[in-house]
Image (cartoon, rainbow, N blue to C red):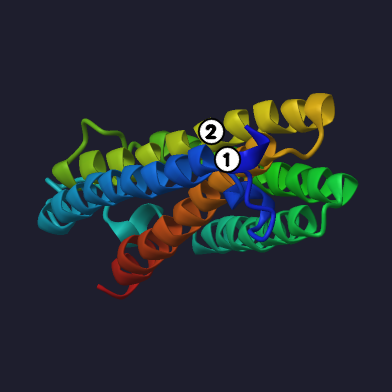
Amino acid sequence: MSANVNTSLPLEYQTEQSRMNILGFWIFLGAEIVLFATLFGVYGVLYERYAGGPTHQDIIMMREVMIQTILLLTSSFTCGLAIFEMRRNNLKGLITWLIITLLLGVGFLFMEVNEFLHYIHEGATMQTSAFLSSFFVLLGTHGLHVTVGIGWAILIIIQLLQRGLTPVTARKTFIIGLYWHFLDVVWIFIFTFVYLKGMVA
């Protein structure tokens, strides 16, 4: 097995299995792009179908959305720092930045749940209009992905504590980093095309 390890590469790329797994995850992200592109497409068709219900301007809390955005984009930066520490073979630094990333992600989710509760209190539910149906499905799908990412990262932290930094744990950490950055990119599109566009429409 050791003969197949290329130590000239970063730890997560040192084995052929790891390289294949990372390539496979890039392909998976391609499928995720198709999923979110479809949801954005549906939202683009339905975003003005209010059916007499609340509009963007009636319900959206831009201050809270801005805080959510700052939390998630900051988590992308701290995730990058975690990978940087992994490349330096600094397990403590890696785990520290991963935990900070998770805390920021939890803060984002907490605020998103409160945002949804506010909408429901204002009478804006999935059943109210086509606009709100597409709105909740798009945001809910992203929020579900963030929830999965948090649970996934917790499992990886446990493995890092048990096994330390190896080509396998480094590969898993790198992949969750790719996933987390992907979710941040999706949120940028949500913030731009759902919230900002909705407020100026």
Q: Secondary structure at mark 1?
A: helix
Specify the quadrant of the image occupied by residue 171. Answer: top right
Q: Amino acid at mark 1?
A: Leu
**Is tag 1's residue or tag 2's residue first in the polypeptide sequence?**
1
> Residue 106 versus residue 112: which sits nearer the camera?
106
- From this viewpoint, which residue is outermost toward the right? 92
> Residue 87 at what x, y percent from top left?
74, 58
Spatial separation of the CA atoms under disc 1 and disc 2: 8 Å
Q: What residue is rendered at 83% in x and 29% in y?
A: 161
Q: What residue is rendered at 37% in x and 70% in y?
A: 196
Q: Is residue 108 visible?
A: no
Q: Which mark is residue 137?
A: none
> Residue 52 at what x, y percent from top left?
15, 47
Label 1 sits on residue: 109
- Label 2 CA crowd tier, 10 Å (few <14, some 14–19, many 20+): some
> Residue 61 versus residue 140: which sits nearer the camera?
140
- From this viewpoint, which residue is outermost toward the front? 3
Q: Secondary structure at mark 2?
A: helix
Q: What residue is rendered at 32% in x and 61% in y?
A: 194
Specify the quadrant of the image occupied by residue 111. Answer: top right
Quadrant of the rendering where the N terminus is positioned: top right
Q: Which mark is residue 147?
A: 2
> Residue 20 at what x, y percent from top left?
43, 43
- From this viewpoint, which residue is outermost toward the bottom? 200
- Residue 164, placed above or below residue 88: above
> Residue 11 versus residue 7: which sits nearer the camera?
7
- Residue 153, placed above or below residue 44: above
**Left or right position of 38 against 14:** left
Quadrant of the rendering where the C terminus is positioned: bottom left
Q: What residue is rendered at 10% in x and 56% in y?
A: 45
Q: Are marks 1 and 2 in contact (CB under 8 Å)?
A: yes
Q: Is residue 59 visible?
A: yes
